[in-house]
Amino acid sequence: MNSVLSLNQTIGVYEISVLISFALLGVATTQTYIYFTRFPDDSIKLKTLVTVVWLCEVAHAGCIGHALYSYTITAYSHPDILLHVPISLGVAIFFAGIITACVQGFFTFRIYVFSETLFIPILLWTTLFLCLLGSLAAFVLELRSTSLADYEAQCWWLFMTIWSLSAANNVTITVTLVVILYRRRPNVLQMTTALVDQVIVWTIETGMLTSAVSIVTLICFITIRGSFIWLAITSRLFSNSLLASLNSRTALRATDEIPSTSLKLSDDLISRVSGLVFVDGTHTIP
């Protein structure tokens, strides 16, 4: 591999990904601000979840930014640095695991709220816990690795397992929520059908996007060895999908304000259609 190609597939692609990641962090920060200003009465548990996810995103951004600085400034004119993995990248992988576990755990709880069954939620929570342990193991192995090639060799099976489980979880969550919502659709009031349809569309859009991210990451890691492309895809889409889901209640309220609707939907009903944790901190089966 020539040096130009090596730089394009390592520092080049990583630099672009960091810039995109910082832009998405700005989107997540804006959505976090919108959430806390528009939904001050949400439960403390839900507010804590949003706060933890956002703080992990900021920490993750700091880690990947530090790694970029190490590669482009600290190690300037020393191409051999590409053979090594900064500790900050290992920390970033661990934070990404925490974010993914929090977001998928929330949507798994949504499944439990709707279905009142524990089989699928327990299965998903178990795989989420395994993925989180895998992220912790990847961080520990990064501390022990001597080069990028050594790190990839040690974590080959680990990353394949984590991203495979993450993609499977995303698909399972999306399909399960869509099926549950579709089955309940005939049982709701006619005026509520549009809200349910909108939630179904949002579920498909956010679920399929995060699933595609996990699958593309896995493909890049398998097919392009010795490259930083697999490091380019971060957890930012997961946090944005969570925040978009929470903030979508504003749009649902706007749907409720259509003039042709004679009966106003309460915020509790909107929350139940969204499958969220409610204002009083409890959950109600719609």
Image: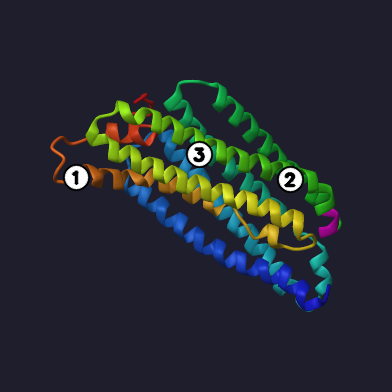
Q: Is residue 238 visible?
A: no
Query: Which picture quadrant has residue 44?
Result: top left
Q: Is residue 185 left or right of residue 175?
A: left
* Residue assigned mark 2: 160
The quadrant the C terminus occupies is top left
Q: Earlier in the sequence, mark 2 or mark 3?
A: 2
* Membership of 243 in magenta stretch: no
Placement of the N terminus among the 4 image quadrants: bottom right
- Element type at marker 1? loop
Residue 108, given in percent of the width and then of the height, sits at 51, 33
Residue 101 lies, with reference to residue 232, above or below; the image says: above
Q: Residue at x 48, y 26 (%)?
A: 112
Residue 243 appears in view: yes
Spatial CA span between label 2 and label 1: 47 Å
Residue denoted by label 1: 257
Sooner in the amino-acid sequence: mark 2 or mark 1 = 2
Mark 3 and mark 1: Cα distance apart in space: 28 Å
| As drawn, 163 above or below 217 | above
Report whether 10 appears left or right of 80.
left
Residues in magenta, as a range: 147-151
Magenta part mainly helix, strand or loop? helix
- Provide the residue designation for mark 3: 174
Q: Residues within 10 Å of mark 1 (few under 14, many from 20)?
A: some
